[in-house]
Image (cartoon, rainbow, N blue to C red):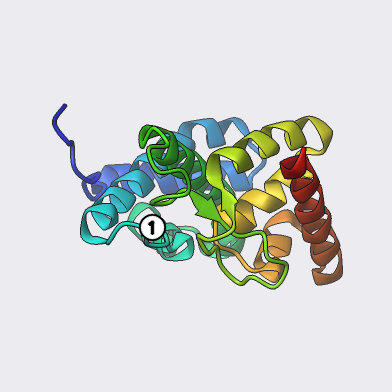
Amino acid sequence: MVDPGPAPDPSPEERARATGLLHRICGGEDASAVELFPVVYDQLRGIAELLLRRERVGHTLQATALVNEAYLKLVDIGQLGTETDSARQHFLALAARAMRRILVDHARGRGREKRGGDWARITLDESMDAPRADDVDLIDLEAALERLQKIDPRLVQAAELRLFGGLSVAEMGACMGLSLTRAKVLWTSARVMLEKLLET
């Protein structure tokens, strides 16, 4: 199979569409997230594939940098007006979910030839500011997240934003409309539950 290479930069029309979808999401049209997700996913996958070809095996993916680059490419920030913060939060949530899929697909695609190899591990360290690839097998983490989804979807959302979006606890809380104190409690709960699920 021929490598399609990274996703091309979006056209002005695609940027306008992405910006318009974010406007609608901010206005409460949750269905617009379904339309925007593939655009976010394709951009992040393209950037990630480009980085993979440049990096050594065992490197760590800098989720925050990828998400920020995709956001700047896809969205016409000047057209968001007063919705800028809200739109960025919605975008970050979609991007974190896309990053989760990209990383898990990549780990599965390697066929686990070397369990724990390139992109296959991630940290659950309470003090982390960004994901580090050295603690938990990504495939095992995905299975734990799927089980946690049935228990408490908000814990999964918190984990996605932290582990796959590369957000700090404060940024995660802002995305979820939580105070810093509540965000810390939610992240601690998510981490503890994931650690328990990973032990079983």
Where does the image place residue 162, in percent across and percent down from the top left?
63, 58
Relative placement, left or right, of 148 versus 105 is right
Name the quadrant containing residue 106. top left
Looking at the image, residue 129 lies above or below residue 43 = below
Determine the residue positioned at 22% across, 53% down: 53
- The number of numbered badges drawn on the structure is 1
Q: Quadrant of the C terminus?
A: top right
Determine the residue positioned at 49% across, 58% down: 80
- Residue type at mark 1 is Asp
**The one of 100 and 72 positioned closer to us in this rendering:** 100
Looking at the image, residue 4 lies above or below residue 19 = above
Q: Quadrant of the N terminus?
A: top left
Name the quadrant containing residue 179. bottom right
Where does the image place residue 166, in percent across and percent down from the top left?
55, 62
Where does the image place residue 63, in percent across and percent down from the top left?
46, 59
Camera sees residue 89:
no
**The one of 198 and 65 positioned closer to us in this rendering:** 198
Where does the image place residue 127, in percent across and percent down from the top left?
70, 73
**The one of 17 and 70 positioned closer to us in this rendering:** 70
Work out which residue is located at the far front of the displayed protein and give it: 114
Camera sees residue 168:
yes
Kindly state the secondary structure of the residue where label 1 is placed. loop
Work out which residue is located at the far top of the displayed protein and give it: 1
Determine the residue positioned at 39% across, 32% down: 111
Which residue is denoted by mark 1 in the rendering?
Answer: 76
Name the quadrant containing residue 197. top right
Determine the residue positioned at 41% across, 50% down: 117
Relative placement, left or right, of 71 versus 23 is left
